Amino acid sequence: MLSRRGFLYGLGVFAGSRLVGLDRTEPDLILYNGNFWTVNARQPRAQAVAISGGRFFAVGSNDEVLALAAGSARKVDLGRKTVLPGFIDAHSHPLDAGLMHLRMVDCDLRSIADILKALQERAAKTAPGEWVLGFKYDDTKTVEARALTRDELDAAIPEHPVFVVHRGGHTAWVNSAAFKLAKVDEKTPDPPGGRYDRDPATRRLTGHVSEAGRETFEKLMPSLYTRDDHRAAAKLISKMLIRTGITSACEADGTPDDLRGYQDARDAGELLFRAYCMIDYTHLEEMVAAGVRTGLGDEWVRVGGIKHFADGSISERTARLSQPYIGRPNDFGILVVSEEQLYERVRKAHAAGWQVGTHANGDVGIDLTLRVYERVQREIPRADPRFRLEHCTVVNDPLVARIKALGAIPTPFSTYAYYHGEKMKEYGAERVNHMFALRSFIDAGIRPTQASDYPPGPFEPMMALQSEVTRMDARGNVWGPAQRITLEEAIRVGTINGAYASYEENLKGSIEAGKLADLVVLGRDVFKEDPSNIINIPIERTMVGGRWVWES
Ligand SMILES: [Zn+2]
């Protein structure tokens, strides 16, 4: 295979006679009569591909590729449909989200009344005293236009501790039973790196808890999930992702259990996308002791970087900013780590040969993280460390220049301008022009990725393309027009750049001979679509490794 690949990379537009004399040159599948956007600069467009052993074998015109067909090759007429490389979601929480879908109440509902009803129904099936858990709650998306309250949670579910986590994952709402269990009351101080919100007038706890304040409650929950649950979670989320055109995703804060879950699902034939599994920093020592580092694995399940955290969340408005949130002059957000702590952690991972990714949203969080990266790379220089800045949301020109100088990779939210538009007013129009800053990154020669952060953001790649190209939300408001990019740029961000972020740019991310046969067939040509309607393009088929994993 390897010896042949070098030759086939150059095959490109002229096939046929040049293949004579090669051994085993027969493709097992040919897709022809398609409108292929390859994301390969040497051959941007094609009509047909030949596939062999799960990889592209030849890419070219119908005549060139069909001439390769031997007796056994299946031929599929794509009816001139547009084909893109499979999308790579470079920062998401697929298995983690799969677990939540298995066991927690999906609170992505449009009224507080509906949310309380769904929690109540779960409580009715849960033994008194045991937790009732909700996820994907969004305080800005209910008709009541306000947040849940402790009192209404108490009234609806008095017998169970309740914990409803925001879809951003950094803050939660709890009831009085949960406070009692956690031994947190009005006299309890806020924990370092966290908050228990209090009524400004009465100092009574409101039930809204943030960052380390949220973790207080999570620590009390018995581990809900078995080994088999992890496998089932990978299976469940597989089906959700592939129907949107995602063929690879990065588990952005995984555990050894998640890694095993991916492997179990893969062995069971249930894993339908390729997973790059970053590992939470708390597991670094056991991973290093086992002799593991970034890159171990194969094209289906691979060990990613070590994940660290610097600050809060954009969708929950806790990211650490140099200028306060609009309307809250004393609120600059939350740093969850000191620079010295982050340095100690990052240094260990970097010295052990791991790629490092740090959650850093606000300009203060990003500045701090960059200083740590610059310092460890100075102290322990490594070739091509590909430091990652997870989210890297609010930037400025000096930060962008330092990201470029370090060769770091930002993974900004792809769907937020569209999906979380209503929250952008808390950042203000001027600052939003420096958020999810794809234009600035690309112009500086940096390789940003597509990243949903699901559950915090929806993962549909068509929504990502629309959001990045238009910067318009569902109501027609435009957020940060200075950061618009072209559709071609957005497709590169969603494909080859994602492959680069996991050191796999020679393996996937474009449609070219030798690479994995991962692709998506669109129902309509995205280049002919009104940019504000891209989200409605149907995904007709998704292929991973030469096999159709989704057909509408
Ligand atoms: Zn994340």
Image (cartoon, rainbow, N blue to C red):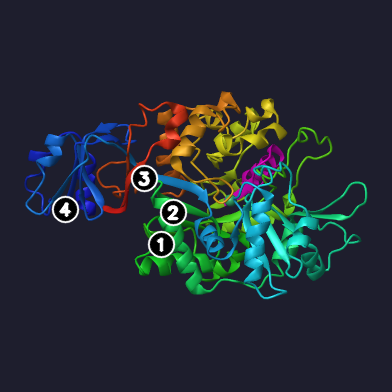
Residues under labels 2 and 3: Cα distance?
Answer: 15 Å
Q: Residue at x 43, y 59 (%)?
A: 302
Q: Residue at x 68, y 50 (%)?
A: 112
- Locate residue 524: give its quadrant: top left
Tag 2–tag 3 contact (CB < 8 Å): no
State whether residue 295 appears in this view.
Answer: no
Q: Amino acid at mark 1?
A: Gly
Mark 4 closeness class: few <14, some 14–19, many ≥20 residues within 10 Å: some
Can you tell me whether the CB of the residue at mark 2 lies under 8 Å from the nearest atom of ligand 1?
no
**Residue occupied by mark 3:** 86
Residue interval drawn in magenta: 357-376
Look at discs 3 and 1 and give the one toward the viewer. 3
Q: Amino acid at mark 2?
A: Met
Look at discs 1 and 2 and give the one toward the viewer. 2
Q: Residue at x 44, y 54 (%)?
A: 240
Q: Earlier in the sequence, mark 3 or mark 4?
A: 4
Residues under labels 3 and 1: Cα distance?
Answer: 20 Å
Report x, y in % for residue 447: 48, 37
Residue 529 covered by magenta stretch:
no
**Residue occupied by mark 1:** 297
Look at discs 4 and 2 and give the one toward the viewer. 2
**Residue occupied by mark 4:** 28
| Quadrant in which the N terminus is drawn | bottom left
Look at discs 2 and 3 and give the one toward the viewer. 2
**Residue occupied by mark 2:** 240
Q: Earlier in the sequence, mark 4 or mark 2?
A: 4
Q: Earlier in the sequence, mark 1 or mark 2?
A: 2
- Locate residue 19: give its quadrant: top left
Q: Amino acid at mark 4?
A: Asp
Under tag 1, what secondary structure?
A: loop
